[in-house]
Image (spheres, grey):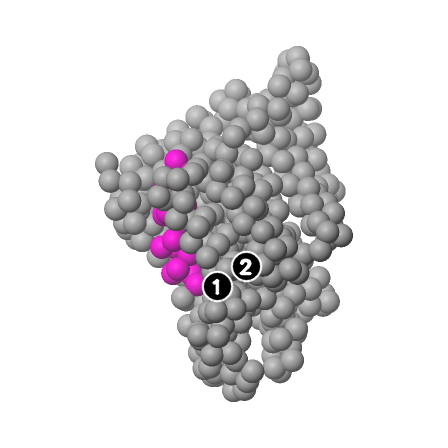
């Protein structure tokens, strides 16, 4: 059964069949090869998505789309520019900082790419930055959307590996801030070397005025994250609060969302949510079948025999995930691999929360690496350029993220210190 499933999935990938359909077909052929009842497929696919924490996914996607249309993202850009926009390279630094703030609500890197990229990519081009550089920067900065909480991939890991989503969320702050600060430092030094961005401060609002204009937008992550860690509501309930808040601010306060816009926003959100849920359903069936076949145990025993130490295990997992992330969508990879790898990590004495951050940060790299990087396609769509043009500018960003990944991997206190402080045993 396992051989049939793997070979079917590889063949479908080679024929450029979508990831969700490839996993689903592989599962169906696996059931047929084992002469099992086909009703298993329906039962397991339903069970995979019949989980309360997964309700947060469509709500956070809807909240991100409401923020984009309701003027929240534009005000966040002006606020970030008032902080870092006055130095050389301030506009690229504004892009990174805005994505960090926007990520604290949307939970989606693709939503961040479209919402912030629609504003900052044209602004970067207007200030003399190459179009390809602007697209590469936006795609990379938006990766923070799946690291800084709330994060859809962290929710998926928590559900798949049976780890506290609240602990994962608070553990994501350290890695997210590390990557954000590293990117801002890099773009500042890179712009000084290239001689770009000497006029980035033109048209910048004062900090006080920008803060006043963005006050309601800045209050959003405070309410969402404060509510989660204050014990007022769960991460799933927080996603519904985010939708309500974004709707009230966009319709009543900023008055930039009209009644006619709601249909477009809801339709886009439903389409995005359906794609993710379809992947989760098929990946859940696939994970059930390979678990039933004993594949996770076999892989676990093999890894324990070959990789004798936690350090080697983490290095091997990072190398494998980096390659996997290039070809498999992040959500599907987490759902399939987390139940396999998390127990092995625990065997090596690695905290499952720390391991979850390592997995998510690594697989998030797949969003900015060809051939299937979804952030790249989104950024190229906004910038209206082909994918091949941004590769030379993208490589330095990938190396910066890889360096941060090594720090996150081998300095677990970066992820766990805040978690241990808040969730004291």
Q: Which badge, 2 or 1, is on the more N-terminal residue?
A: 2
Residues in magenta, as a range: 164-180
> Which of the 4 image quarters holds residue 22?
top right
Q: State how many labels appear.
A: 2
- The quarter in which the C terminus is drawn is top left
Q: Nearer the viewer, mark 2 or mark 1?
A: 1
Residue assigned mark 2: 142
Q: Residue 313 magenta-drawn?
A: no
Q: Quadrant of residue 393?
A: bottom right
* Residue 299, horizontal then vertical, whole percent: 45, 31
Residue assigned mark 1 = 215
Visible residue check, residue 1: no
**Residue 421 higher or lower than 392, as above or below:** above
Q: How far, Cα to Cα, is label 2 from label 1?
A: 22 Å
User: Percent x, y for residue 405?
Assistant: 41, 55
Between 271 and 250, the one nearer to me in the picture: 250
Label 1, residues with CA under 10 Å away: few <14, some 14-19, many ≥20: some
Residue 170 in the magenta stretch? The answer is yes
Q: Is residue 128 above or below residue 380?
A: below
- For the residue pair 261 and 287, the one nearer the viewer reads as 261
Q: Which picture quadrant has residue 181?
A: bottom left
Element carrying mark 2: helix
């Amino acid at each position: 059964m396992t051989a049939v499933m793997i070979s079917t999935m590889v063949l479908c990938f080679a024929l450029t069949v979508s990831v969700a359909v490839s996993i689903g077909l592989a599962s169906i052929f696996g059931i047929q090869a084992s002469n099992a009842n086909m009703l298993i497929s329906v039962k397991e696919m339903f069970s995979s998505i019949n989980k309360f924490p997964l309700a947060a996914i469509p709500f956070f996607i809807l909240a991100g789309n409401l923020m984009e249309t309701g003027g929240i993202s534009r005000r966040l850009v002006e606020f970030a520019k008032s902080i870092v926009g006055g130095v050389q390279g301030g506009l690229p630094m504004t892009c990174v900082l805005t994505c960090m703030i926007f990520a604290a609500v949307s939970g989606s890197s693709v939503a961040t790419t479209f919402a912030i990229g629609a504003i900052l990519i044209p602004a970067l081009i207007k200030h003399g930055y190459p179009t390809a550089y602007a697209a590469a920067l936006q795609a990379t900065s938006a990766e923070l959307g799946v690291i800084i909480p709330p994060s859809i991939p962290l929710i998926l890991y928590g559900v798949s590996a049976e780890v506290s989503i609240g602990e994962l969320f608070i553990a994501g702050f350290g890695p997210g801030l590390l990557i954000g600060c590293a990117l801002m430092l890099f773009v500042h030094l890179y712009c000084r070397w290239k001689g770009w961005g000497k006029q980035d401060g033109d048209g910048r609002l004062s900090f006080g005025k920008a803060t006043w204009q963005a006050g309601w937008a800045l209050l959003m992550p405070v309410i969402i994250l404060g509510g989660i860690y204050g014990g007022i509501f769960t991460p799933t309930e927080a996603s519904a609060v985010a939708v309500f808040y974004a709707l009230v601010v966009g319709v009543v306060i900023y008055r930039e969302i009209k009644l006619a816009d709601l249909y477009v926003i809801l339709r886009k959100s439903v389409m995005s949510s359906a794609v993710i849920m379809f992947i989760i359903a098929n990946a859940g069936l696939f994970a059930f079948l390979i678990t039933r076949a004993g594949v996770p145990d076999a892989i676990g025993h093999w890894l324990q025999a070959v990789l004798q130490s936690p350090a080697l295990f983490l290095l091997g997992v990072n190398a494998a995930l980096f390659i996997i992330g290039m070809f498999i969508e992040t959500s599907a990879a987490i759902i399939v691999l987390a139940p396999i790898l998390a127990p092995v990590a625990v065997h090596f004495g690695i905290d499952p929360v720390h391991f979850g951050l390592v997995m998510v940060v690594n697989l998030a790299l797949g969003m900015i690496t060809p051939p299937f990087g979804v952030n790249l396609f989104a950024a190229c769509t906004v910038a209206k350029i082909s994918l091949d043009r941004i590769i030379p500018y993208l490589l330095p960003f990938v190396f910066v993220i890889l360096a941060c990944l090594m720090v996150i991997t081998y300095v677990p206190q970066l992820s766990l210190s805040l978690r241990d402080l808040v969730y004291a045993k």
